[in-house]
Image (spheres, rainbow, N blue to C red):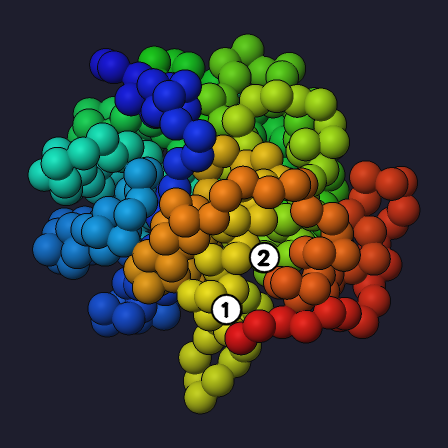
Amino acid sequence: MSNRLQTLLETRDWLMADGATGTTLFNMGLQSGDAPELWNEDHPDRIAELYRGAVNAGSDIFLTNSFGGTRARLKLHDAQDRAFDLNRIAAEIGREVADASGREVVVAGSMGPTGEIMVPMGPLTHEAAVEMFHEQAEGLKAGGADVCWVETISAPEEYAAAAEACKLAGMPWCGTMSFDTSGRTMMGVTSAAMSDLVEKLDHKPLAYGANCGVGASDLMRTVLGFRASGNERPVIAKGNAGIPKYVDGHIHYDGTPELMARYAVLARDAGAKIIGGCCGTQPVHLAAMRKALEGTPRGAVPSLEQIAEELGGFSSGSDGTDGNGPQRRERTGRRRS
């Protein structure tokens, strides 16, 4: 299997990833509580539409509809024995869309957290986690994914288990964590700690970084933390389209295409190599991001003050890398929405 992503990383100044999966599928009719992965079999046309939306908006990389594709997550829907096939189909649909695009597009096999807590704090052992991730990775590989894409992880132990699983499957991989608790992951990992973690893994990712979390400003601060660590491995930035708000019974993200375009440029200038969106990021946001990345010359590394001014203030006073514990403060700066 050719390493399509590695080649692009070596030959391109930046790459654009995709946006939201869940938000887009909800707009297509997915109901709260349903497993999106079941749509790979039940509504393959809608999944192809999801993928094409990202590709047509300019994404160089898109993630498969397999975020909750481990046995542990699918068991909630009595679909645990279909794990391999649901992942395979997700990648097969993606492979067809990518191959029909007329350009080099990477199919990234999404692998989200198992939803279980690992030992010693919970019941999930390293061996069991590796087994579940391995089954998922093999399914994605069989379907034609170019790379496994581990995302939204909080625990370093689960991140390491996914890395081992990708190695067993013979797959290159990328991995992001979600820094959603005052600049740390839910399990207390800082950007500096993650930068250190990835270099200690036997099977290292092609790129690492952050996705989801709070808003674009907080994610940008995490990206600057990766840069400050001295780790030169390519960095991924996939921020949410603004801040979620509950409106008329639905979750709405307030980030405009203009805000996400500015975020994309700032992320590139901060040192991110792969730039995309997460929750709330639709094709209209991606198209604006692509246009801005192509049309805006590279600038200086942005300061925290510039980030707050252009994207909105931070949700906490510290990201944990300065040794301070979580300290929430009032949001500052002006959010363009």
Which of the 4 quarters of the picture holds residue 169?
Answer: top left
Above or below, comparing residue 194 to residue 322 in the picture: above
- From the top left corner, tell me how far across and down residue 155 is, in percent: 63, 37
- From the top left corner, tell me how far across and down residue 137 is, in percent: 33, 27
Q: Nearer the viewer, residue 160 or 192?
A: 192
- From the top left corner, tell me how far across and down residue 331 is, in percent: 75, 70
| Residue at 73% in and 69% down | 333
Q: Which mark is residue 314?
A: none
Q: Nearer the viewer, residue 285 or 169?
A: 285
Q: Quadrant of the N terminus?
A: top left
Q: CA distance from mark 2 to mark 1?
A: 9 Å
Q: Are marks 2 and 1 in contact (CB under 8 Å)?
A: yes
Q: Nearer the viewer, residue 124 or 181?
A: 181
Circle 1 is placed at which residue position? 255
Above or below, comparing residue 44 to residue 84 in the picture: below
Dot 2, crowdedness within 10 Å: few (<14), some or many (≥20)? many
| Residue at 39% in and 45% down | 294
Visible in this render: residue 37? no
- From the top left corner, tell me how far across and down residue 133 is, in percent: 41, 30
Amino acid type for the residue under numbered disc 2: Ala
Circle 2 is placed at which residue position? 216
Q: Earlier in the sequence, mark 2 or mark 1?
A: 2
| Residue at 29% in and 22% down | 4
Dot 1, crowdedness within 10 Å: few (<14), some or many (≥20)? many
